[in-house]
Amino acid sequence: MAMLQRVRNLFRRLLHRGAAERELDSEVRAYAELLADEKTKEGMTPDEARREARLDLGGVEQVKEEIRSARAGVWLETLWQDTRFAVRMLRKNPGFTAIAVLTLALGIGANATIFSLVHGILLRRLPYVSPERVVMIWEKRIRENMLTNVVSPADFLDWRNQNRSFEGMAEVSYTQADLLGGTEPLRVPAALVGPDFFEVLGVQPESGRWFAPIDEQ
């Protein structure tokens, strides 16, 4: 119940800030009057009592500010005030508002695009069994300064026959192909792969069978 009451008070302060501030001011001033009455009973004049009461409190406005800072959800109140002020300022300057919204839209769109690329390329796990163990090997042609040269079929066969480091090896070469059967032919990315390709990656074909060694001939 106490939590529910605090939530109600928070929403009341947000939606009816004027009334909440008047209540706070009334409570602080009433406490100052009670303190002044006590000092009057101690023998002070009314003026002296009120002055001493203000000194003891440290000022009505300072007390009110301390109470605001101690309230639960004060950050939400501050955010609500800043948002209302920002909306008022933006309504007064429609040209600046349009530029600000466009800048935010471009910034958010660019960040979303960059994050999507980073997630797709660097963060998302590859759809293979143990993707951290999958590597790609290239030939080097030092004289031509080519560090990722395509491996010749003969060299790859030698690598595979002499392999002592990997559980399996499969060749792959990227290309493009024409996809027929629709209203218009489509140029699509494709790959030429060896018979062990799916087995090395640990995946199953969507349909049909794995390639057989005879298919490599």
Image (cartoon, rainbow, N blue to C red):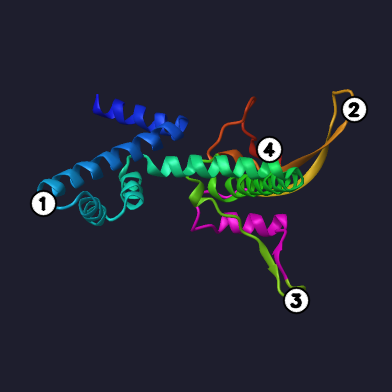
Labels 2 and 4: the sequence-earlier one: 2
The extreme front residue here reads 45
The part of the image, by quadrant, that contains residue 91 is: top right
The answer to whether residue 66 is above or below residue 5 is below
Q: Amino acid at mark 2?
A: Glu
User: Residue 74, image x and y in percent?
Assistant: 38, 43
User: Residue 54, image x and y in percent?
Assistant: 26, 53
Labels 3 and 2: the sequence-earlier one: 3
Indicate which disc residue 43 carries. 1
Q: Amino acid at mark 1?
A: Gly
Q: Which residues are magenta?
A: 146-170
Q: Looking at the image, which is closer to me, 217 or 124?
A: 124
Q: Looking at the image, which is closer to me, 37 or 170?
A: 37
The residue that label 2 is drawn on is: 184
Residue at 62%, 40% (x, y): give it: 87
Indicate which disc residue 214 carries. 4
The extreme left residue here reads 42
For marks 2 and 1, give the one nearer the viewer.
1
Q: Looking at the image, which is closer to me, 82 or 18?
A: 18
The residue that label 3 is drawn on is: 143
Label 1 CA crowd tier, 10 Å (few <14, some 14–19, many 20+): few
Instruction: Tell me the quarter of the image containing the C terminus.
Output: top right
- Element type where label 3 sits in the image: loop
For marks 4 and 3, give the one nearer the viewer.
3
